[in-house]
Amino acid sequence: MSPLEPYHVLERNLALEMARVTEAAALAASRHMGRGDERAAVRAASRAMRAALNGVGITGRVVIGDHDPGCDADTDPDCGLGDGMPVGTRSGPSVEIAAQPLEGATICATGMPNSLSLLALAEAGGFAPMPPGLYMDKIAVGSGVPDGALGLDRAPGDNVRALAEVRGVRPADLVVCILERPRNEGIITAVREAGARIQLIQDGDVSGIIATTDPESGVDMLMGSGGAREGILSAAAMACLGGWMQGRPLARTEAERSALREAGLDPRAPILALSDMVRGDVMFAATGVTDSAVLRGVRRWPDGATTHSLVARTKSGTVRRIEARHDLRRKAAVAGADDPA
């Protein structure tokens, strides 16, 4: 039996298991929300996600991870997720893992919006390789935009006017989400000159990209540069949720250009379509840590918590939203800890 066949058989179970994994990471991170310690929040989320993944019936390999540099996975079984790390029970389908246990560590530590726990699964070769530390130019919108209408090869203002035409509205009716960074100031200026409104975010552009697929979010488009590996996770989300996206890895130094070449990518800033970044059957899950336009954050109450998640898959196009209530006292008793989150 090929790896794809059991993956198909287990698709419903895997969807729920993925939500359980991102829930575990979000619950762990929520203990550190607003406490000003980014590293503690990341470590808690990474360790919780790895522990949860190791209980899932898959033969998984991490290709995009979030390993804690202060933790030695060879000696500490509670370390986070590193590239190449095997995960799962090793008794299920062979899958690749792209994970961001805590997207937006700074905003979690300061209690700001848009922090998420993210996970994507794919068949072998499903995720484009992406070296750590790179940035990526991104443009993303929801469904219904014809091929060629928008693109990273066009000026930001032209993209605003083109989307307005496609949507049958004025540029002033559009909201563009942009990560507030000095490197994005030119895009911010161009979008304002085109007449569109802007939602500036401090961190967590994956949340902004997902928001473009939800008509209730108030976000129509995302533009600007952010993390390249987060771009691959965003592409997984957009492939599952029916959105459109392009990305362009930015190699600023010879070392980064060399890393791109070693990963099999052209360092001459090629534009990557959605199908270049993710391929085949892909599943995606996200759980809110702090509130965002798409998902509510963790709500903690005495001895428990409530989480809000979404799970989606390219093959079926189904998007499931899951609200879960967690009895942490009971979980702690089973786990033999004070609070597993």
Image: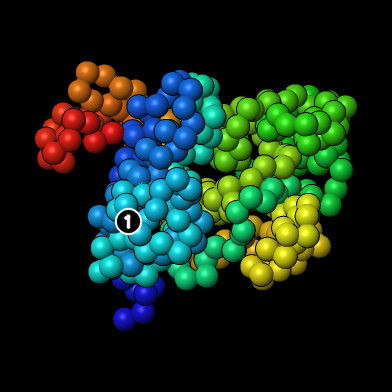
Q: Quadrant of the N terminus?
A: bottom left
The colouring scheme, among rainbow, by chain, secondary structure or one colour, is rainbow
Give residue 148's position: percent from left, percent from top.
78, 55
> What residue is shown at x 61% (from left), y 59% (from top)?
130
- Circle 1 packing at 10 Å, graded few (<14), some (14-19), many (20+), is few
- Observer-nearest of 339 and 301: 339
Up-down: is 156 above or below 173? below
* Residue 159: x %, y % from top left: 81, 41
Residue 221, horizontal then vertical, whole percent:
69, 37
Residue receiving disc 1: 75
Q: In this view, does 31 lie to the left or right of 288?
A: left
| Count of all numbered marks drawn on residues in the image | 1
Q: In this view, does 247 lie above or below 185?
A: below
**What is the quadrant of residue 177 in the picture?**
top right
Which amino acid is tagged 1? Thr
**Residue extending furthest toward the top:** 302
User: Which residue ends up furthest to the bottom in the rendered image?
Assistant: 1
Q: Specify the quadrant that holds the C terminus.
A: top left
Between residues 88 and 151, which one lies in front from this camera angle? Answer: 88
Q: In this view, does 14 lie to the left or right of 194?
A: left
Q: 255 left or right of 321? A: right
Q: In which quarter of the image is residue 24?
A: top left
Residue 55, image x and y in percent? Answer: 25, 55
Quarter location, residue 327: top left
Q: Which residue is drawn at 20% across and 23% down?
A: 303
148 versus 20 height, above or below: below
Residue 58 seen:
yes
SS of the residue under disc 1: loop
Residue at point 68%, 26% (across, down)? 200
The answer to whether any part of residue 114 appears in the image is: no
- Determine the residue positioned at 53% across, 34% down: 104
